[in-house]
Image (cartoon, grey):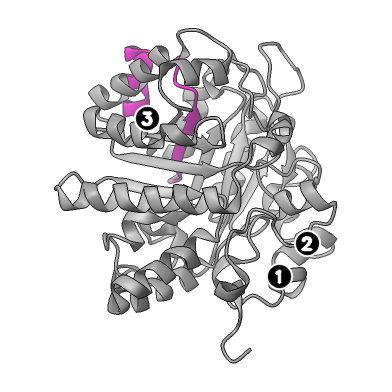
Amino acid sequence: MIGISKLYCGSVEPSDVIRYGAESGKLPSHLLQFSRDKKPVVVWNVTRRCNLRCVHCYAASKDLDYGNELTTEEGKALLSNLSDFGSPVVLLSGGEPLARKDLAGLARFAADRGMRVVISTNGTLITREKAAEFRSIGLSYVGVSLDGTRDIHDRFRGKTGAFDEALRGIRFCREAGIKVGIRFTVNRRNAGEIPKMFDLIEKEDIPRACFYHLVYSGRGSALIGEALTHGETREVVDGILNRTADLFRRGQAREILTVDNHADGPYLYLRLLREDPARAKEVLELLRMNEGNSSGRGIGCVSWDGDVHPDQFWRNHTFGNVRERPFSEIWEDRSIGLLAKLKERTHHVKGRCASCRWLSVCGGNFRARAEAVTGDPWAADPACYLTDDEIRREGE
């Protein structure tokens, strides 16, 4: 994640992180990406079932009972292990997590063990009562996926009325006092909707928005042809920077992030270098703390059936199953070749990534995307939009 509001608009300073010692167990949620120890944030896909059929779903979910989900007790064993391991956040996702009847109990169990609990949802199943229950549990955050305004969102989600239902869920969360935000996956079909999403978060007083770069996984693999060109991506990122800065100038600050393309970090820094060199120096320090993509190290995934993956998008690689070994034991097993390499990824990337001046800032970007396009998990990420001049090391 690249915190646009934190880095570009100065809502976080390097001293904020230093004050907490940069340890994940001590850092507040908005500073976790700068932690030194990088205990993994874990995405647990609690179910594959979903009441919608989104065109870019990384889990290729349908509205049916897939079976073989972790039971309630197995889920609690997983959450206990994550808590003992020091994972600061568990993100409950799906499919649609609210399709799981014991979701609230699992969320409460994790929160009672001191974890920060986040839910990623399509929002359509959030009722006023469910929002109040989430509030009583002490959820840290609810992220609701939107793909644009009404017609475009409903087309992406395969259901007429999905937008209105999601917006109602957002309003119920706001009414209950839960921090809620939108999650927007950018592709050629909806990039023009981004300004409207900024209008929406201001109108509805939504405190957070995450703009995701497309990852070619699940049904999203069929959208490779819908991915933005490098030039279009630069225009989108500039637009996000401009609209975020405008919100701050008008006293309407929101937490705005981009996700799944760590080229955004150097791009933001290079822009700041032209606009505010002093601020750019501080931002570079924070970007180095962030360390870029962290699949297999600072983020991991447990599927509905207990399989452990490097991240939620990279399901063709499985490191083990929590029914057989605890997550913490799997995660620390250096005999698992790909997992061990991901923990020292900068030694293994190839092509432009290997010689890039921003490798320590970007971390080699998204390995799942590189493998999806080239077949090689260590090839350069094809979604990196930085020019050869921008990545060239000084003196070359």
Task: Determine the CA span between mark 3 and mark 2.
Answer: 43 Å
- The numbered mark, 1 or 2, whose residue comes first in the sequence reads 1
Marks 2 and 3: in contact by CB < 8 Å? no
| Residue range of the region highlighted in magenta in the rendering | 115-139
In the displayed structure, 273 sits above or below 157; it is below
Q: Disc 3 marks which amino acid?
A: Ile
Task: Determine the CA span between mark 3 and mark 1.
Answer: 46 Å
Where residue 72 appears, as percent x and y from the top left, is: 62, 25
Check disc 2 and report the residue beneath it: 379
Marks 1 and 3: in contact by CB < 8 Å? no
Q: Secondary structure at mark 3?
A: helix
Q: Nearer the viewer, mark 3 or mark 2?
A: 2
Check disc 3 and report the residue beneath it: 137
Check disc 1 and report the residue beneath it: 352
Q: Disc 2 marks which amino acid?
A: Ala
Q: In the displayed structure, does residue 192 sit left or right of residue 249?
A: right
